[in-house]
Image (cartoon, helix red, strand yellow):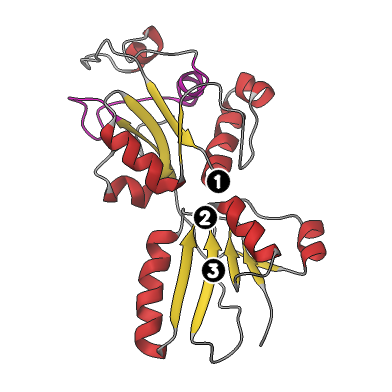
Amino acid sequence: MNFKALVGAVAGLALATTAMAAEITGAGASFPFPIYAKWAATYKGVSGTSLNYQSIGSGGGIAQIKAKTVAFGATDKPLTPKELNAAGLTQFPTVIGGVVPVVNIPGITPGQLALDGQTLAGIFMGKIARWDAPEIKKLNPGVNLPGRAITVVHRSDGSGTTFIFATYLSRVNADWKNDVGADTAIDWPTGIGAKGNEGVAGNVAQIGGSIGYVEYAYAKQNGCVDLLSAIS
């Protein structure tokens, strides 16, 4: 078989390359990279064929598969039928994962901090700028919240993870939907940018008082305090 495939939905892997190739190349979302790396090692062990996947973001993956410089692409934001037909691509999902907010607040442990969707939107819009803001204190009675500024860390590259997170915020907060919206790249009202899930997780791990959003595996790998079970 000799065709190109774009992996869509929540990102996945399609072995879409010439048979007997010495190396399969792919590029795209950082979201699935942890499992892709494990699959690549296993596949090479049983087939002798290497799989080289570049974790460059959904936008980069779409660009490279359309340019036919890789055998497969990965994106967390699926392409429309019109886009697929125009580029001659095949798309299907193979991986499901979760996007979680992560924080670095000295003294706060996993499961201790609660944030709802409205408050998250307020933080990522810059309207809630301190960890001891009334909106956060109301959700966390008895929690010793520090009186320090919140540093928002977001993606700087075209990102399906951003699309997933922004879509959630658009559904729970009308101001976010009207003023910011949801796409792989958005005009962030506040914060600092970082490339890839790796970059966001790394920055949150290093910056006290920060908050970001990553695929769950990156939160675990970087020792970030995730809010997986603390959002309503």
**Circle nearer the N terminus (3, 1):** 3
Q: Residue at x 64, y 21 (%)?
A: 174
Where residue 139 appears, as percent x and y from the top left, is 35, 17
Circles 3, 1 touching at the beta carbon (< 8 Å):
no
Which disc number belongs to residue 159? 1
Question: In the displayed structure, would residue 42 be above or below residue 159?
Answer: below
| Residue at disc 1, secondary structure | loop
Determine the residue positioned at 20% across, 15% down.
144
Find disc 2 in the rendering and name its residue: 29
| Circles 3 and 2: CB atoms closer than 8 Å | no
Judge from the rendering whether residue 108 lies leftward or rightward of residue 14; answer left or right. Answer: left
Q: Quadrant of residue 210?
A: top left
Q: Residue furthest left?
A: 107
Is residue 216 found inside the magenta-colored segment of the image? no
Asked if residue 118 is among those painted magenta in the image, a careful observer would answer yes
What amino acid is labelled 3 in the image? Gly
Q: Which label was assigned to residue 26?
A: 3
User: Quadrant location of residue 37?
Assistant: bottom left
Query: Can residue 34 be seen here?
Result: yes
**First to last magenta residue range:** 104-126
Real-space CA distance between mark 3 and mark 1, rounded to the nearest whole angstrom:
16 Å
Q: How many dots with numbers? A: 3
Q: Identify which amino acid the numbered label 1 is placed on.
A: Ser
Question: What is the secondary structure assignment of the residue under circle 3?
Answer: strand
Mark 2 and mark 1 lie on one chain; the one further toward the N terminus is 2
